[in-house]
Image (cartoon, grey):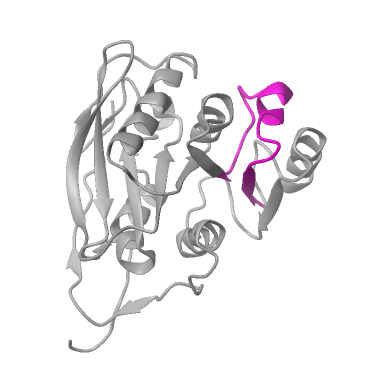
Amino acid sequence: MGDAVRITANAVLPARREDVTLVTADGLRLVGELSLPADRAARATLVLLHPLPTHGGMMDSHLFRKAAWRLPALADLAVLRFNTRGTVSEAGRSEGRFDNAVGERFDVAAALAFAAERGLPDVWLVGWSFGTDLALMHGCDPRVAGAVLISPPLRWSTPEHLARWVGKRLVCLVPEFDDHLPPAEARRRFGAAVPTAAVVDFPGARHLMVGHAEVVLDAIVGTVLPDVPTPLPRTRAGPVERRQPVIVTS
């Protein structure tokens, strides 16, 4: 097995990875990737909804890249990530154009339909920034067990959208220094509409959670699979690929 090595930002752990295409009800083809545990069945599924594409958000944004590269091996999770309409990454550009969280409802629906068609278990949405609005507005579906919201700005989401989530698990990971929605305001707004929503503070963090990826992944796993010990391993004895991500902008 060899000596344990540090799981760094460019570490890619073993998984079965497949380039996939999601087809929306309005006829668009979206670029995506499905990552599964290498040698066993997934215990649960994360559908990742990325940050604002007009400000650089995509399926390769750092938290989501690390989730896909680590969590199938460390937590037996299936990870589905994709570019919403008009969004580009190293994997390619999804068809269509950014639609201010309106047409993106078809993108979320296409991802959930894909997860159902593949028989992926226990589906959770993980939204980040803009992706949290997509989750809240378009993701409250009977097939969804719950949602983890990273740095939710509540830019497009209304109290009516939030109220739909009463009865489902909703966990909000809120940076201490978030310019969009700091923890106290997040507690007020979520508490008024979804009293059961949990708001978790991230001391010292800002909106993009740079430098906090490991604890964010721990929080996601601890929510979705609470029996998996966290913190997750920070080192690994075994195969580790090193990959330099190519960041593509529109």
Residue 127, x across and y down, in percent: 50, 39
Residue 120, x across and y down, in percent: 34, 46
Q: Nearer the viewer, residue 120 or 16?
A: 120
Quadrant in which residue 160 is drawn: top right
Residue at point 45%, 30% (across, down): 52
Quadrant in which residue 61 is drawn: top left
| Residue furthest to the top | 26
Can see residue 24?
yes
Residue 38 in the figure: left or right of residue 171:
left
Is residue 169 located in the magenta-colored stretch of the structure?
yes
Classify 116 as above or below 233: above
Classify 226 as above or below 181: below
**The magenta segment:** 147-175
Residue at point 17%, 87% (across, down): 1
Residue 151, x across and y down, in percent: 58, 43
Quadrant in which residue 146 is drawn: top right
Residue at point 29%, 34% (across, down): 117
Is residue 115 located in the magenta-colored stretch of the structure?
no
The quarter of the rendered structure image containing the C terminus is top left
Q: Nearer the viewer, residue 160 or 61?
A: 160
Q: How many marks?
A: 0
Residue 223 in the figure: left or right of residue 32:
right
Residue at point 34%, 38% (across, down): 115
Can see residue 59?
no
